[in-house]
Image (tube, rainbow, N blue to C red):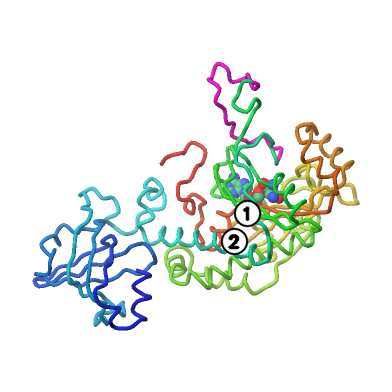
Amino acid sequence: MREMIKRVLMSSTERQGVTVAGWVRTRRDSKTFSFLEINDGSCLANLQVVADAGIPGYEQVERMLTGASVEITGRLVASVGQGQQWEMQADSIRLIGEVQADYPLQKKGHSLEFLRSLSHLRPRTNLHGAVFRMRSRMSFAVHQFFQERDFTHVHTPILTASDCEGAGEMFRVTTLPPDKAAMDAEDFFGKKAFLTVSGQLEGETFACALSNIYTFGPTFRAENSHTSRHAAEFWMIEPEVAFCDLQGDMDLAEALVKHLVQHALEKSDGDLTVFEKFIDKTLRERLEFVAERPFERVTYTEAVELLLKSGKTFQYPVEYGLNLQSEHERWLTEEYFKKPTTVYNYPKEIKPFYMRLNDDDKTVTAMDLLVPGIGEIVGGSQREERLDVLLENMKRHHLDPQDYWWYVDLRRYGSVPHAGFGMGFERMLMFVTGMANIRDVIPFSRTPGSCDF
Ligand code: 4AD
């Protein structure tokens, strides 16, 4: 359909003998002709086709039901009907794939839950078509952002032996039969292996050679979280920058969020109208606001003070030294600051071993970027580049430096201050589409108890 739209802008000869193929959305018949609404998924708009009785293939028109695939050749002409500027006057029509009577997407207005059970068919709906086209555009925009800034894209491994976050939430990968599961030395790699939770540690090795790098790939977490923001398989964008501190890291994260929002506004006009209609009327307004205004920055200590002074009753306790929960993050961004907010300098006890210790000896250079409606979409830090302090951190986290010898080596050979972050790609997509559940922005979502398709 997108191709059609391009053609109508061209010369009249190019509007003749045009062939389109797609799926029938609706069909209306009169005695002497039929109207078919065709969509090929390339954009939101349908193409209206007028097929006069008697043209080649018209004898098949009754079998061109909602969901059937068809091919039509004809002329693009100015439409006299309402709702579209152009339509196709068919010269011939052909049924490609018939649709059986139990096709489940007959009616409009199916619930998102129901559509999740039809993940193989839901991309054909207006809403999910828009979501997944947006996903594709956002993916392009991520690469554009970094490539324009001369970052090198590094493919970090999916199979790994190291737990970057130290949270023990890794999926094990083994070829051992169940009765030999404990015999690590006999396993495929001669030791335990897992699906990666983050490409960061490997990313750091490349930043310490190529300066500015990023990874963008699937990551896996075996955390038993049943929230609307957690998936077992999700994509993460992880830049890592050498000769960079926490301030530079926060600047980069904010710039990336703004770039993606701006790209969505500029390139997804049609699809945004779907989200506005079905999901969130204020979406465009909210995105424009985020694209234009500066974000807020606040230390963890200040954030805790604000939460304590808020007078609100939260489900989870607020106390210095505890993690901020989603409800706290949302209060800060939605009710207090009313804009995206970066919280930084967290207590060292609640953050991973690789974060750089601040001079106060209490906090580390961690930062989380929070957005209204979702909470955390970016988590990052300046990394500990001092060998002795890193070894001390590892000890505190009960990690054996031997297991991370290559990571420790970076601090032995020309160590540099460096920083990076991870952006949850699906969380960012939730933000630009307004979709409230992460399962609805992943083609085939994997969550605890669910690995269909
Ligand atoms: O804060 P996280 O755990 O940070 C890291 O993994 C770092 N190693 C990244 C880095 O510094 N290179 O995760 C980063 C982001 C979160 O802010 C969130 O947006 C997303 O990844 N995320 C998830 N998204 C969906 N489902 C999950 N289970 C997620 N866990 C984290």
Q: Residue furthest top?
A: 179
Q: Main secondary structure of the magenta part?
A: loop
- Residue 51 — which label? none
User: Secondary structure beneath disc 1?
Assistant: strand
Q: Quadrant of residue 23?
A: bottom left
Q: Work out whether mark 2 precedes mark 1 in sequence or the reverse, and give the earlier one.
A: 2
Mark 2 CB in 8 Å range of ligand 1?
no
Question: At which x and y percent is residue 151?
Answer: 68, 60
The stretch of residues the image draws in magenta is 165-185
- Does the rendering let one see residue 325? no
Kindly indicate whether the residue at mark 1 contacts the one at mark 2 (C-beta within 8 angstroms): yes
Residue 86 on image: x %, y %: 29, 78
Answer above or below: position of 38 versus 76.
Answer: above
Q: Which residue is mark 1?
A: 237
Q: Give the vertical position of 448 relative to 339 (above or below).
A: above
Q: Is residue 146 magenta?
A: no
Side (left or right) of 63 relative to 190: left
Residues 176 and 283: in front is: 176
Can you give x and y, in whole percent of width and height, for residue 341 in the image?
70, 62
Secondary element under disc 2, as helix, strand or loop, is helix
Q: Is residue 23 visible?
A: yes
Q: Is residue 165 left or right of residue 118?
A: right
Quarter-of-image position of residue 428: bottom right
**Residue 167 colored in magenta in the image:** yes
Identified by mark 2, the residue type is: Val
Instruction: Please rate how many residues cluster around mark 2, counting C-alpha atoms within 10 Å: few if below 14, some from 14 to 19, many from 20.
Output: some
Give the distance between the C-alpha atoms of the residues marked 2 and 1, in whole angstroms: 8 Å
Viewer-closest of 295 and 244: 244
Residue type at mark 1?
A: Ile
Find disc 2 in the rendering and name its residue: 142
